[in-house]
């Protein structure tokens, strides 16, 4: 049975409104300049710590590891209470997941978000039941693009890591799939800072209406 593994932020869910609101909340708390929405959106994708570091770099600031640790802890604490204030599934996600489930594919989430935050977000949006495994950066002690997290996610979902497809929105997701030697579908509505097509995934989709067809086209390669 084929396993379809999804990234979370920018792929399944448009989490930018709550992530950016949290980022600006903790920056303002420290007396630092906030980041305009359009400039902050491409910062998402490498986890909250990476988002903080890149936001500081935009202002030409560098912080010690301990300073970043403090900002990260504040980020997680605030974000956990506001994780689904405005975050929403991307259009047509439910229908796409229905199609994949009807085809008897296993579904899983592999995110660089912390596992408990990923679970809380999907619980809040009533999507957790859709996935056989929901894994984050802390689940196995490695992060994407390390292929170990991808393979371990597939295994936890009850699948075969050699028979899987990655679906994501960023270079990290494409690199993860290449490292794991599996096909990858890129969504062009996420948070990548370069056009998805330039990252050369096996397929690019502009809507979840196109997902089932893209998966079907890649089945022979799995």
Image (cartoon, rainbow, N blue to C red):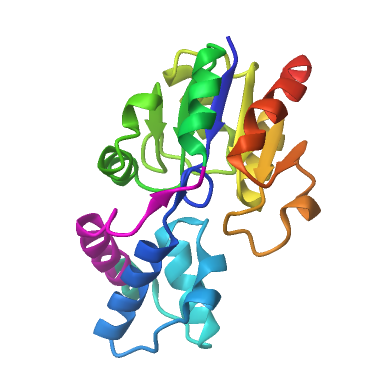
* Coordinates of residue 116 in the picture (x, y in percent): 28, 41
In the rendered view, tell whether residue 121 sits above or below residue 40. above
Q: Residue at x 33, y 81 (%)?
A: 27
Tell me which corner region of the image, top left, top right, bottom left or bottom right, holds residue 73.
bottom left
Q: Residue at x 45, y 47 (%)?
A: 112
Asked if residue 219 is among those painted magenta in the image, a careful observer would answer: no
Foreground residue, 5 or 64?
5
In the picture, the quarter occupied by the C terminus is top right
Residue 116 lies left or right of residue 153; in this view the side is left
In the picture, the quarter occupied by the N terminus is top right
Residue bounds of the magenta highlight: 70-91
Tell me which corner region of the image, top left, top right, bottom left or bottom right, holds residue 118.
top left
Question: Residue 149, can we see it?
Answer: yes
* Coordinates of residue 71 in the picture (x, y in percent): 31, 71
In the rendered view, tell whether residue 48 sits above or below residue 183. below
* Coordinates of residue 110 in the picture (x, y in percent): 48, 36
Q: Residue at x 49, y 47 (%)?
A: 90
Residue 170 lies left or right of residue 152; in this view the side is right
Question: Residue 182, can we see it?
Answer: no
Residue 90 lies left or right of residue 132; in this view the side is right
Q: Residue at x 48, y 23 (%)?
A: 98
* Coordinates of residue 54 in the picture (x, y in percent): 51, 72
């Amino acid at each position: 049975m084929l396993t379809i593994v999804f990234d979370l932020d920018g792929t399944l869910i448009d989490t930018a409104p709550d992530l950016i609101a949290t980022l600006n909340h903790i920056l303002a708390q420290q007396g630092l300049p906030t980041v305009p929405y359009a400039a902050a959106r491409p910062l998402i994708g490498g986890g909250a710590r990476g988002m903080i570091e890149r936001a500081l770099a935009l202002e030409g600031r560098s912080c010690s590891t301990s300073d970043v640790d403090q900002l990260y802890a504040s980020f997680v604490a605030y974000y956990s209470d506001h994780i689904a204030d405005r975050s929403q599934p991307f259009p047509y996600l439910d229908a796409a997941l229905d199609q994949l489930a009807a085809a008897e594919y296993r579904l899983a989430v592999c995110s660089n978000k912390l596992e408990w935050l990923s679970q809380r977000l999907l619980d809040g949006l009533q999507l957790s039941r859709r996935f056989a495994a929901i894994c984050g950066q802390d689940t196995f002690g490695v992060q994407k693009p390390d292929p170990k997290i991808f393979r371990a996610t597939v295994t936890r979902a009850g699948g075969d890591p050699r028979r899987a497809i990655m679906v994501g929105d960023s270079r990290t997701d494409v690199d993860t799939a290449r490292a794991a030697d599996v096909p990858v579908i890129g969504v062009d509505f996420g948070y990548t800072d370069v056009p998805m097509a330039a990252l050369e995934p096996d397929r690019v989709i502009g809507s979840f209406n196109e997902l089932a067809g893209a998966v079907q086209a890649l089945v022979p390669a799995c």
